[in-house]
Image (tube, rainbow, N blue to C red):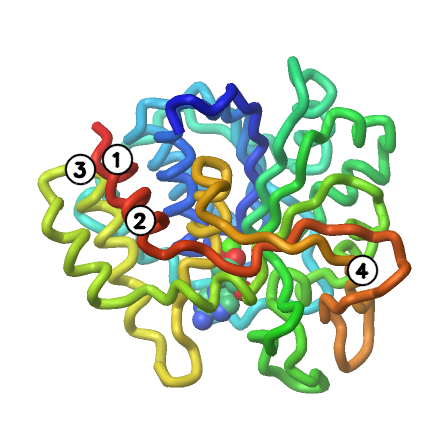
């Protein structure tokens, strides 16, 4: 990834544990210039997620990167216990005393994204590891900004596999990031932007396993390996485990920016169901013209090797 061309990135995450692991990776990618971070209050509570974001920027000595918080709340809220869970990150021994003096955030992610796209010195990769609402709303307000988007990279969808939403009045075909705001997802695929998705079809191959964590712990002398190991350990207690395994959803998606050659892709015409019992279902829509680049597989050995390498950086 040393030889990759410089890439401007705008990162919108939604405060889950793997969203923050994604931020750790991103901050250590030499070819990435991170233009800003926006937080969607989806799989998190906003204040907690903003604090974790600022703490990680302080630890990586990157407090120059601007942060913003989103005000839009999707139509299908995440379960409260999932949203509350990542607060534990701020209590970890390596996090609890990290000061964030002067940390501030812009109180509107839509304006923030508009400003960041408008002032970007070149094409921007917009990395989304939560719902796509902020980006879609920004482009709706100012459609000319679409010209500044080089690629949208989104952890979202479940195309040829079942979804991970299990709730009332729903048939289980949707992935959560799409389900939270299915209307915006519907619009995103219609917008004619170059969109790459990393759906459950790809992420199902990479659960967070004990094997992986044991191997990572062997390089705990590296600060960020140790920190990442602690973050991942907080995801292991999901009960019942047979129903909710934690996957490397966002981590895999973020790694695409550095090791695209480790993935297999398929070009598909896709639509997201905007409402109803299958709201958020990302399904094939032949002849819609809504082409999306979809990750279908990853070479696991290359992916894990990349993670170990990346987390050995100072
Ligand atoms: O559907 C995957 C998305 C990813 O962006 N999120 C978690 C990742 O950050 C929602 C989600 C699905 N299952 C979950 C989730 C679980 N068991 N706990 C927390 N979040
Ligand atoms: Ca997420």
Q: Secondary structure at mark 4?
A: helix
Judge left or right: residue 15 versus residue 138. Answer: left
Looking at the image, is mark 1 or mark 2 earlier in the sequence? 2
How far is the residue under mark 4 from the one under mark 1? Answer: 38 Å
How far is the residue under mark 1 from the one under mark 3? Answer: 14 Å
> Mark 1 CB in 8 Å range of ligand 2?
no
Q: Position of residue 14 (x, y in %)?
A: 53, 51
Q: Position of residue 262 (x, y in %)?
A: 44, 47
Looking at the image, is mark 4 or mark 1 earlier in the sequence? 1
Which residue corresponds to the image point at 67% horizontal and 78% vertical from the top-left?
Answer: 173
State which mark lies toward you, 4 or 1: 4
Q: Secondary structure at mark 1?
A: loop
> Mark 3 CB in 8 Å range of ligand 1?
no
Rendered image quadrant of residue 38:
top right
Can you say whether 93 is above or below 80 in the image? Answer: above
Which residue corresponds to the image point at 54% horizontal and 53% vertical from the top-left?
Answer: 264
Looking at the image, is mark 1 or mark 3 earlier in the sequence? 1
Along the line of sight, the residue nearer the viewer: 10 or 261: 261
How far is the residue under mark 4 from the one under mark 3? Answer: 41 Å
Residue 76 in view in this figure: yes
Q: Position of residue 11 (x, y in %)?
A: 55, 37
Q: Residue furthest top?
A: 121
Report the quarter where the C terminus lies: top left
Q: Read off the residue under disc 4.
A: 183
Which residue corresponds to the image point at 58% horizontal and 40% vertical from the top-left?
Answer: 127
How far is the residue under mark 3 from the one under mark 2? Answer: 16 Å
Q: Read off the residue under disc 3.
A: 223
State which mark lies toward you, 4 or 2: 4
Q: Read off the residue under disc 2.
A: 90
């Amino acid at each position: 990834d040393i030889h990759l061309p410089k890439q401007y990135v705008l990162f919108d995450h939604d405060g889950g544990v793997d969203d923050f692991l994604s931020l750790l990776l991103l901050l250590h990618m030499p070819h990435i210039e991170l233009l800003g971070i926006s937080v969607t209050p989806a799989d998190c509570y906003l204040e907690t997620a903003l604090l974790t974001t600022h703490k990680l920027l302080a630890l990586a000595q990157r407090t120059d990167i601007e942060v913003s918080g989103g005000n839009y709340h999707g139509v299908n809220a995440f379960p409260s216990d999932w949203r509350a869970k990542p607060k534990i990150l701020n209590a970890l021994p390596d996090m609890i005393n990290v000061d964030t003096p002067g940390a501030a955030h812009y109180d509107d992610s839509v304006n923030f994204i508009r400003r960041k796209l408008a002032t970007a010195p070149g094409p921007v990769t917009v990395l989304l590891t939560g719902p796509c609402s902020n980006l879609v709303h920004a482009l709706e307000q100012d459609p000319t900004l679409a010209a500044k988007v080089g690629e949208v990279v989104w952890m979202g969808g479940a195309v040829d596999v079942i979804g991970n939403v299990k709730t009332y009045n729903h048939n289980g075909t949707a992935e959560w990031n799409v389900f939270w705001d299915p209307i915006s997802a519907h619009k995103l695929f219609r917008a004619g932007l170059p969109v790459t998705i990393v759906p459950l079809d790809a992420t199902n191959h990479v659960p967070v396993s004990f094997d992986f964590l044991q191997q990572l712990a062997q390089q705990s002398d590296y600060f960020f390996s140790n920190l990442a190991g602690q973050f991942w350990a907080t995801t292991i207690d999901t009960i019942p485990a047979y129903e909710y395994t934690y996957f490397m959803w966002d981590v895999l998606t973020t790694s695409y920016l550095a090791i695209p050659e480790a993935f297999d892709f398929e070009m598909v015409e896709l639509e997201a169901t905007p409402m109803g019992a299958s709201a958020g279902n990302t399904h094939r829509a032949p002849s819609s013209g809504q082409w999306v680049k979809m990750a279908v597989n990853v070479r696991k050995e290359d992916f894990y090797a990349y993670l170990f390498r990346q987390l050995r950086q100072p």
